[in-house]
Image (cartoon, rainbow, N blue to C red):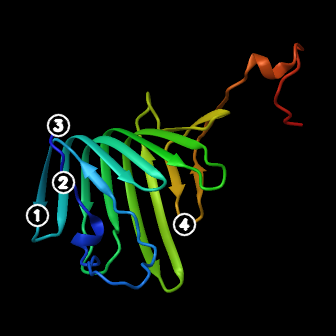
Amino acid sequence: MKNIIFLFLACAGGLALAQTNAPQAPTHQLTEISSDSADFDLNIHRAIYLGHVFVVDPPRVTMQCEWLRVDLPGAGGHLTNVVAATNVVIDLVDEKSGLTNHVTSDRAVYYYSQHGTVTNETVTFTGHVNSPPKVEYPDYTITSEPLVWDRAANGFHFNNEKIIFHQSTNSLGGTNASPLKLF
């Protein structure tokens, strides 16, 4: 696999290197993308990655897919649109619990906009009838079409969801009681 590294801050014109004796401010960890091949269209500021695409966006997100399109921002701008397709697998580390949520889908679309003080930042996952997108938590799995991760609010929104609880026989304490206390 050919490793192609794309540093979002560098391409957005936001990266400057200088040596100084002053204490360094915390820096944003750079996003790394590797793939079998990539095409960059500098006229429309778009990158397309093909084959075995792997993205590391520290500290919370890793993603795998077969095709990725990134619309690059202008100098100093913020990414506004990213599309991942074919066998999309994303692992999200929950900031509060430290647990990893595992999301699978056919397609994922990242969208960012800011209007005044209101920020919208979402990832919409879609699939098809036989394989809707799903998010796997340690205790349960949710399928939904579509499944929307609201990054600004740090939560998921589900339509037509189906929840499957993972029950451990060890948690039953030798009884026939359900470990779920719904009522």
Image coords of residue 50 (percent x, y): 18, 44
Image coords of residue 12 (percent x, y): 25, 74
- First of labels 1, 2 by sequence position: 1
- Dot 3 and dot 4 residues touching (CB under 8 Å): no
**Dot 2 corresponds to which residue?**
48
Image coords of residue 152 (percent x, y): 54, 66
**Dot 3 corresponds to which residue?**
1
The secondary structure type at the circle numbered 1 is: strand
Query: In the image shown, does 148 or 2 lie closer to the viewer?
Result: 2
The C terminus - image quarter: top right
Q: Residue shown at 34%/41% (left/top)?
A: 64
Label 1 packing within 10 angstroms: few (<14), some (14-19), many (20+) = few
- First of labels 4, 2 by sequence position: 2
Q: CA distance from mark 3 to mark 1?
A: 22 Å
Using the image, determine if residue 122 lies above or below residue 137. below
Label 4 packing within 10 angstroms: few (<14), some (14-19), many (20+) = few
Image coords of residue 26 (percent x, y): 46, 73
**Dot 1 corresponds to which residue?**
41
Name the quadrant containing residue 41.
bottom left
Label 3 packing within 10 angstroms: few (<14), some (14-19), many (20+) = few
* Residue type at numbered disc 4: Ala
**Dot 4 corresponds to which residue?**
152
